Amino acid sequence: MALDVNEVGQIAHLARLAVGDEDSQDHARNLSNILAFVERLSAVDTTGVEPMAHPLEMTQRLRPDEVTEPNEREQFQALAPLTEHGHYLVPRVIE
Amino acid sequence: MQWEAVIGLELHAQLATQTKIFSGASTAYGAQANTQACAIDLGMPGMLPVLNETAVNYAIRLGLALDADVAGRSVFARKNYFYPDLPKGYQISQYELPVVGQGHLDIDLEDGSRKRIGVTRAHLEEDAGKSLHEGFTAMSGIDLNRAGTPLLEIVSEPDLRSAKEAVAYMKKMHSLVRYLRICDGNMQEGSFRCDANVSVRPVGQVAFGTRAELKNLNSFRFVERAINFEIERQIELLEDGGRVIQETRLFDSDRGVTRSMRGKEEANDYRYFPDPDLLPLEITAQQIEAVRAELPELPDTKQARFVSDYGLNHYDAAVLTSHRELADYFEAVLTHCNDAKLAANWVMGDLSGALNKAGLEITESPVSEVALAGLLARIADETISGKIAKEVFEAMWQGEGDADAVIAARGLEQVKDSGAIEALVEQVIAANPDQLEQYRAGKTKLMGFFVGQVMKASQGKANPQQVNDILKRRLDG
Amino acid sequence: MHDRTIAELSAALDRGELSSVELTRATLAAMETGSALNAFITMTPDIALAEAKAADKARAKGKATALTGIPIAHKDIFCTAGVRTSCGSRMLDNFAPPYDAFVVAQMRAAGAVMVGKTNMDEFAMGSSNETSWYGPVQNPWDTRCVPGGSSGGSAAAVAARLVPGATGTDTGGSIRQPAALTGISGLKPTYGRVSRYGMIAFASSLDQAGPMAQSAEDLAIMLGAMAGFDPRDSTCVDQPVPNYQAGLEGANLKGLKVGLPREYFAADGVDDEVTQAIAAAVETLREQGAEIRDISLPNTELAVPVYYVIAPAEASSNLSRFDGVRYGHRCEAPKDLEDLYKRSRAEGFGEEVKRRIMVGTYALSAGYFDAYYLKAQKVRRMIRDDFAQAFESVDVIVGPTAPSTAFSMGAKSDDPVQMYLSDIFTIAANLAGLPALSIPAGMGAGRPVGLQFIGNHFAESTLLRAAHAYQQCTDWHTRQPGEEG
């Protein structure tokens, strides 16, 4: 499955990664190689086989509906690049 | 060309749990920004989701109330996209295997008939945070308090055919989630939200037309206006030879129009896959039965019972059962009063009117069930007339005491002594010789005038029936 | 002092031969002396000395356990409260979480002394520790060679005897392969045995934390502290933790049914020196009474492609949270939201991480999900079933951990697929969620060769006993770099 730079651009956009033109070529080549490598899976007969999302046959545990987390805003926002009035700031989004 | 509208609604009910769906942070409304966003809600590195058991119970309750399949096994999936109010860069939702499957909700149409609206599915997911676009110079401010609040997304079949049907369905679902106590239904606070999928097709065509998705419909009125506008817009477009584009549109409530959303809504590839941090949710038959045992009487059952047990008409029963608290109040009144019709009129009329004017919920009524029943008893035993009762009610509302106290304090007891009434009648006749002559000459409509004068002379306390009888005898005789 | 194992050091501390403070000081000094290896991203001398003092006090009160006062390093993927946790990435160079990972808290509660955070492949993606923002780690056996990855820093630190033990994580072999390449012992527990809370996620259904040390006995001691139930991780299992150390008592190989997968032993691309060393190790097992059996794991060849669909897919989603908004790297003067995301992430992530995010995004995208992701999950089940079948007739499965000894820096870094094939023997255990360990079992061209044992779910005791028994009659695990001719 060979990818071209356009497809690389689309994937990079979905993944929100800025990819320069030069890098696009490298990525196209690398991705194509990796995809060629995993291509052999398509030849495997998996009729009747259920996909396995987890190695263990377990089901989800439930948590009681009780408040356990206190307000730790100051601690968390000390890690933030940009905040104001307790809000995280990003370039304005037009909706 | 005759057109038919096809509408499906996606309703989001914020579940009234204490904590988020995947973390132990509080969901209380109105907190300062980011004071209820813990490390899990913030999507901090290494943090993992753990499922809230009450959110699951609430989903089961809804499933049972919609007569739907509750999945024995359902799976949480990641919906991947980038937006500042979505801290992990994905929303944990359910995709192929939702917790609630096919069900239905019956709605009452304006012509009195019932229509069954299919519910395709309902699934659990987490809410996103909020973005504020004002108040930060050239920036948007993100508040993640709401991130992680449990939502039930309820998807209807495209069975609705008009804005009115859509609103009826939405109101019924709104009432239901409040009945079930799984959601407070506060639309101003965003606890109950609606997206509508709207398309049109020529009458008789089986295939669906292209649909537009309307977002940002946060009141019943907006839903109705937006859908009506959109139906018109699409019909006009198609009749002009254009094509409807599948897109998301926002409702601009100021101008009453829908407009296309830009930016966020490029074709989004959500890359759904089962969330590897969560395991499949198993719900056993025992769990379902345990939830079923705790279900309250549902609106439709209660409505039918009000009709059969209390002899109410369909409409009155529907109004009284639209809110569980209202129905409970009404039935409590009936434990002290056995005139269901009278009680219904007063609860739906004067009481509800006063509550609305004061902006109070029925549970905050200054006139209790017992007090109202006491007032109704005095109407029933003719101590006071219906008209005087309104004055008594007003006084009770203001806290002047129960019905008997007010009647006594203000001397409002009805005058039923025929001697006293006859004396008043004589008084009025004597004072109005011209009208008497006119009446006797044939203007029988003046009876109303005489009745009014006698009532006035008695300060409204004379028994109206007796007044009528005595006057008639006196005037005709 | 440092050549001693955790068990030996613990005994020495008990005897009063030295204090934890002295031991910690010596450890910190060794870390400085050995800094050219670049095994550490952050050293924590103040915390270490405070914890050492506390350990000495606890010991004086008679409350010491096997890890009390023992210096331990943590792979920089484990969140450590107030201490930088970089995951080997520029993205988190400025990140010091306000919480501890479960593993870190457990080790502290057991009395271990944290001396620092070790270097690793960025976001655990790599098999050579060449993708770290903080530069490559050197293999103490040959500093022109890689130590393996992604837990390369932990491996090098233990191999060079800078610390007696270190924590690592293993998603496709990232504990076992570096252990093999640096001549130490490393264990990946059963999936769900150790809580992933506070462990920065790479591929959630494959990641497991585990110990790295000089001997199976030390692994047993560390695992006993690291394992345990944690309600904050939905995927961890609520099962009692055995006393792994006590369980080593009387360990021997007699009658142990050892399976040798013919696909492992007929594989292309395995260096001769590895083949020879492993053959000799198998002979030793046989001599010690193990019953060697030929088994088949028919879908062996598919493990690497399956992994390279599933792991990047999960990673692409797990790494979406790194967006410059709430923590971590943020680009300068973003002109709009798209620019904020794209530049922050492009600047914050290295090439291998970007590559895997792209592969993963592609594998999940519309039109490709069924062909790639779903298909891989089906083959994953087939691989798991191969093992289930094999364990009906054997107790453990044995083979080489890696197809070669430590390779030169730069040798494989230009060809991702070549690099991925380093994981050919280790990956299947992650896919199937099985426990596996690697211990030194020979040398090839002056560099260590690792022998891998794979066990059934929750059979860590069986693995540790077998490895311990092997280490009682061999001395590969005592060899140190610089001693070999």
Image: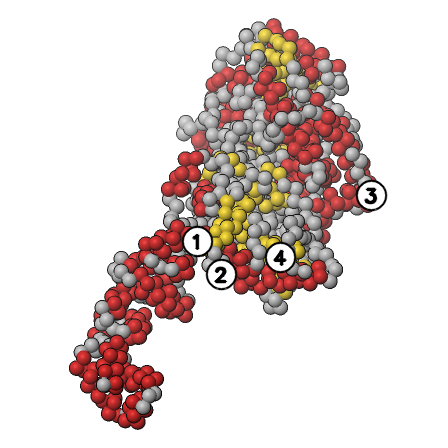
Q: Residue at x 73, y 17 (%)?
A: C267
Spatial separation of the CA atoms under disc 3 and disc 4: 54 Å
**Mark 4 and mark 3 in contact (Cβ < 8 Å)?**
no
Q: Quadrant of the C terminus of chain A?
A: bottom right
Helix, strand or loop at mark 4: strand
Judge the density around disc 2: few (<14), some (14-19), many (≥20) Cα neighbours within 10 Å.
few
Visible residue check, residue B74: yes
Q: Is residue B399 above or below residue A85?
A: below
Residue B468, by quadrant, is: bottom left
Q: Quadrant of the N terminus of chain A?
A: top right
Discs 3 and 2 share one subunit: no
In the displayed structure image, the side of residue B346 where residue B147 appears, left or right: right
Where residue B93 appears, as percent x and y from the top left, is 57, 44
Q: Which mark is residue B110?
A: 2
Name the one closer to the observer, B77 or C61.
Answer: B77
Q: Which mark is residue B178?
A: 1
Chain where mark 4 sits: B
Instruction: Give amino acid for label 4.
Output: Glu
Sequence-earlier tag: 4 or 1: 4
